[in-house]
Image (tube, rainbow, N blue to C red):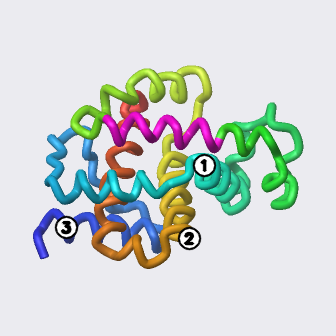
Amino acid sequence: MSDSLLAYHCVSLNRGAGHSSVDIDYTEIMVEWTDKERSTVSAIWEKIDIDVIGPEALARVLIVYPWTERYFATFGDIFSATAVLGNAKVAAHGKVVLKALDSAVNNMDNIKATYNDLSRLHYEKLSVDPDNFKLLADCITIAVACKLKSALNPQAQATWQKFLSVVVEAMSSQYF
């Protein structure tokens, strides 16, 4: 196993276990994508239905991490799982989030610049704690895994999580 692949597994395992002590800042290093990684991300993305995965992922964030509700005060009743799952504004914003992820898929060599304005918005105007981007990325991965099942094998998951880690770091770039 290569050192870089081992690092991705360690990040995934540590984050999955609730630890955040191991973080790789992909925006400060040149992220190099192999042809296989590019094709893996593209293949996963082609199987994602934005209208399904987006709402599921955002709903999961709000249900599993209820303190994130504070960022969605204008969404009305989101104080129970049933309310979150039936909330049209949650579903609509989940679609917006996934549509924005399409920009990263199409700009894998310059994700940080692609998300510069969005990062600034979340930092300066919305005051979103950047740790929430990691939570959302994890929930996106879970929603994707639930849909793709065995198609998201460990190797594909490692690549997908590398990709989302780069997106998370890009979304956090204005904070540090």
Q: Secondary structure at mark 3?
A: helix
Q: Which is nearer the eye, 119 or 176?
A: 119
Judged from this view, the residue extending furthest toward the left is 2
Residue drawn at x 32%, y 61% is 22
Q: Residue 28: percent from the left, percent from the top?
A: 21, 39
- The secondary structure making up most of the magenta span is helix
Residue drawn at x 59%, y 21% is 125
Reading the image, the residue beneath label 2 is 146
**Callout 2 crowding tier (Cα within 10 Å): few <14, some 14–19, many ≥20:** few
Q: Secondary structure at mark 1?
A: helix
Q: Is residue 31 left or right of residue 23?
A: left
Mark with earlier residue (2, 1): 1
Reading the image, the residue beneath label 1 is 54
In the picture, the disc for residue 5 is 3
* Magenta region: 94-106
Q: Residue 68: percent from the left, percent from the top?
A: 68, 47
**Callout 1 crowding tier (Cα within 10 Å): few <14, some 14–19, many ≥20:** many
121 up-or-down from 44: above or below: above
- In the picture, residue 23 is in which quadrant? bottom left
Residue drawn at x 25%, y 32% is 110
The amino acid at mark 1 is: Gly
Mark with earlier residue (2, 3): 3
